[in-house]
Image: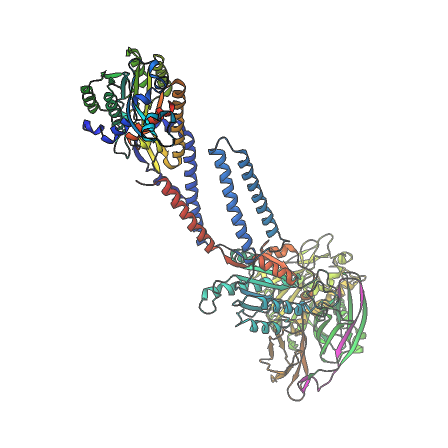
Amino acid sequence: MAADTYLKPEVINQIKRLDLRAQFVVRGFMQGLHSSPYQGFSVEFSEHRKYTPGDDPADIDWQAYAKTDKYYVKKFEAETNITGFLMMDLSESMGYSYRQSMNKFDYSICLAASLAYLMIGQQDPVGLITFDQKIRESLPPKSKRSQLGNLLSLLSQLKPTGTTDVANSIHQLSVMLKQKSLIMIFSDLLVEPTPVLDSLLHLRHHGNDVILFHVLDEAEVVFPFDGMCRLENPENKEFLHVDAVGFRKDYVAEVESFRNTYREFCFKSGVDYVPLDTSMPFDQALLQYLLKRRLRG
Amino acid sequence: MLLVPIIVHLIKQQKPRHLIFPALQFVQERIQSNQSRLRFRHWLLLLMRCLGIFLIAASFAQPSSSSSTFGTWLILGALGLLAILLLFVLLSTLVLFRPINILFFAIVCTLFASVAISIGIIFFRSFDEEGEAMIGSDQAPVSAVLLIDNSPRMQFEMAGQGEGDEVNQSQSRLDASRTTAEWLVRQLPDGSNVSIVDASANEPFFCVDKAAAIKRISALTIKYLTLPIPERLENILRFLEQDSELGSLEPDQGLPREIYIFSDLSVESWRSKRRKEVQLKLADRAETSVYLIDVGVAEAANYRLDDLELLTDAISVGGSADIVARVIRQGPPGERPVELIIDKIDPRRPSRRDGVTLEPEQRLLRSAAVTLEENGSQELSFSVQGLPRGIHHGVVRLRGGDALEVDNQRYFTLAVRDPWSVLLVRPKKRDEIDSEVADRIINAVLSPEDLVEAGQAEYQCKTIDQEKLLEENLSSYSAIFLLDPRPLDSRRWKTLARFAQNGGGVAVFLGENSKNGLSAEESFLSEAALSVLGGRLGEIWTPPETWFSNPDYNHPIFSRFKRFETENLWRDFPVYQHWGLLPLESGKSEIQTILGYSNQQAAIVDRRLGSGTVLTVTTPFTEPGTLTGRIRWNDVTTGEWWPTALLIDQIAEYLVSSEKNQLNYNVGDNVSLVDRDNQDNRDVLLYTPRNEEPTELRFQEEQLRYRFTETPGNYRMKTIGKGGGRRGFSVNLESRQTDLSRVSEMTLDETLGKGRFKLAKTKKEIVREQGYRREGKKFFSFLLTLFAIVVLLEFLMSNRFYRKV
């Protein structure tokens, strides 16, 4: 896949309209520019737009109202110097796709590239870490424009192979980080959840912000099969016979239960958990995340 | 056949799709419950396939039920399916859904219990013997055979004894059968085949239509010559079998078969040796319904005259005949007068005038009254004597009437003729006293002087010496008595043999004189002698204490002794000596010992020789009261020797009987009359009791044969032309034919098979039993529809389980 595939203009446009910084650290933004707990964090006026019901009346620019006799809302573009890490799961299961044009891995890369572009556009340093059983490669975070090229180049060369140990890799990263960072993890999390949750807690313990993009294939979410199926795990070659139709409900309930486990834990521990599947347009997934960030703010 | 769906099921099961699926951990978490459900569904699919095969097999078996129970079966089937469904839901709830929803579970349990109880109630209410059919109708055509007993018993009038709503008070059993049978034919579904069969030997056939069947029923009359019901049933089953084989002639079109038996359930109508065969045949034809319609009553009251005991059909002029009549009462005690009536001699009668047979007038000869206990009997003996020479017809009649008229009279015919000529042959005068005595003793018995003088002696005896045997014209005698004979030469033996072969009777009383010449020319051991005696003389036995013993009561000679069976008649008449008679090596069956001694030796031996008879008595009956110079042979003619006298009389009667005609027959017998006087074979006119035109019959070689004796009564004959004598014979219905005793249930079961028939008495009962048994509607279409539904379900289910990509 070419590197610019991840940089679709409509995605970038939507991200620009909803500033990552503004959405990410709502708390710092709302506490005022003067006492931001994050050093180097700035807010710049970006544009006016007409007030529409539902907007925060606090955002109304009264000066503009005095001039034009119309309500205009001030929009801001957040800037931060927070270091971001894109953490990409290289497990073989990430390469799975049943009927979607993108597998989980491609989808994750697309998403990661979008975020990287956005962050570099905000001149935030962003780095890349890949892992399977442990961390394989890491690209140190930088905010230069050239970093984007390097990052995308590396991303495009990645191949999902072998088994994975998400918890170990996160623990490893926690130890490696020297400053508080924003860790964006892209994984299907098809491992035992408890160690992973422990590792996330470890990451949070060091003051890092974590966004967990839980990427599953659309088939893994809705279980679209019919009839008798022999299902084989590509990583350990285990297999099972199931009656797909009869099992679908149970399966979907199980997936939901799994997601809820993460969702509840992440909520409690301040991790942003974003369940995704490959049927969702990746830009929409990004948007959904940012909206959610904003709502949380 | 049920293996087919199982094999298909297993083959189809072997095709799961192979898919790569990394999120197997989510599957593993829930796989356990899914596997149970999967297994459950497989069982369901297998069940569905088996059910499909079962239904198609059941459809082709073409099950059917009586139309009255058809609806009930459908309801039961639907409830059964519902019960299975609910059970299925219950099981799946238990197996698959945990935790169990108690409310749901309780509701399903209650529903299931309700359905099960409903099935039970419907089943027992509908198929209980006493219950009534709940729904349905009986409109499918059938092949019905109505067997209506028309034996004389069915003449029994129901007056005063009828029961229920079906019986008209003045109807006979046959009338009642007719009424019910006509109603039955009318209510048979349109398009049914109907056959009306009576108890006579006629071959069954199907009537053209119901109207013809009803006509045939109303034309049914009493027949005196009938077959028992088991025999008729066998005929009917054979007829139905042939009918289905012939197919094209009178096809019953595979219609359900029904046999209706109208019977009074009397013992006689079910007495048969073919019962077992009938039962087996009926068991083989389970599809044939058998209805037994009882037209009798449990306690039928009747007076009945038993078969007459007529000791002889012919007596001599001046002789007497004893006619013994037994009156049998079935029912409560009662009294009845009994009369003996005899034809007056009238040369002009019988004759025909204006289509009516004018029979001779009758006169009352004897009468008596009987008083009978409940279910008792009483015997009457009428002595008939003083009748002129010729044939006499008469009747013993029970006066007073009762419900069954046919058994209140017994007809008889008696021949009165000249006394029988008996030749007494005494030995040569070696011992004059013995000879005279011998002659006298026999004479005293057969033709006592006072009777001879009064012209009433039954026998006319002539005594000759043994030497003059060849000079005598033996053909003028009916019997010859050889009294203690000396050995005879071959000529004389041959003469005697010829006499016997021509129908004469010979009695040889062996005694003292028989000792001589055992090896001489005049002998008892020559071939000629043996050909007469039928036994070889052995040694003389001198047992210490012996008397006559073991008479054969079935033999005509001893039939009169039967009443003394329990008394030891001969104990007072010891036998001191007797000859031993050894059977010949060839022809053992020719002789029959009819009286023995208490030492198991033979006393009297009977031998058929040609048309006649030879009796050999191994001790003489002719010894005088006192004897000197030798040992007595016996004391059978000493003291009050009436048993010996009776025995001599019976021997004489038996010896002359071969010349007698049998004049009294039972219904169905073939009549054979010999008339030696009718040398020119003149034709006779026979006037039957059927009030029909006389039949002209012809004697052929002094013999006349007649076989249409199906009606009881006096059959009178008149010789065509002048000077013809009166002849004729009588025919009676056997007494047991009118025995109204009821047959036991066991006998019915043995004949028709236990549970194989339905007993009904009223029309209502018949309708109900028809409803149970009649094969109305078939389940074919329903089963086929169910099969289609099951196939569809199976298709949907298997597609869902085994859908291909």
Q: Is residue B234 above or below residue B724?
A: above
Residue B331: say if magenta. Answer: yes
Q: Which residues are magenta?
A: B327-356
Image quarter where the C terminus of chain B lies is: top left
Judge left or right: residue A52 versus residue B199: left
Where residue B763 appears, x then y in whole percent?
A: 64, 63
Which residue is situated farthest in the front direction here? A67
Name the dominant secondary structure of the magenta segment.
Answer: strand
Q: Nearer the viewer, residue B140 or B324?
A: B140
Where residue B39 appears, x then y in whole percent?
A: 42, 35
Q: How many marks?
A: 0
Judge left or right: residue A87 versus residue B48: left
Where residue B249 appears, x then y in whole percent?
A: 46, 70
Which quadrant holds residue B9?
A: top left
Q: Nearer the viewer, residue A109 or B534?
A: A109
The answer to whether any part of residue B7 appears in the image is no
Where residue B56 appears, x then y in whole percent?
A: 43, 51
The answer to whether any part of residue A32 appears in the image is yes
Q: Is residue B257 above or below residue A211?
A: below
Q: Nearer the viewer, residue B796 or A266?
A: A266
Which residue is situated farthest in the bottom direction here? B722
Q: Is residue B313 above or below residue A268?
A: below
Q: Nearer the viewer, residue B200 or B306?
A: B200
Which quadrant holds residue A131?
A: top left
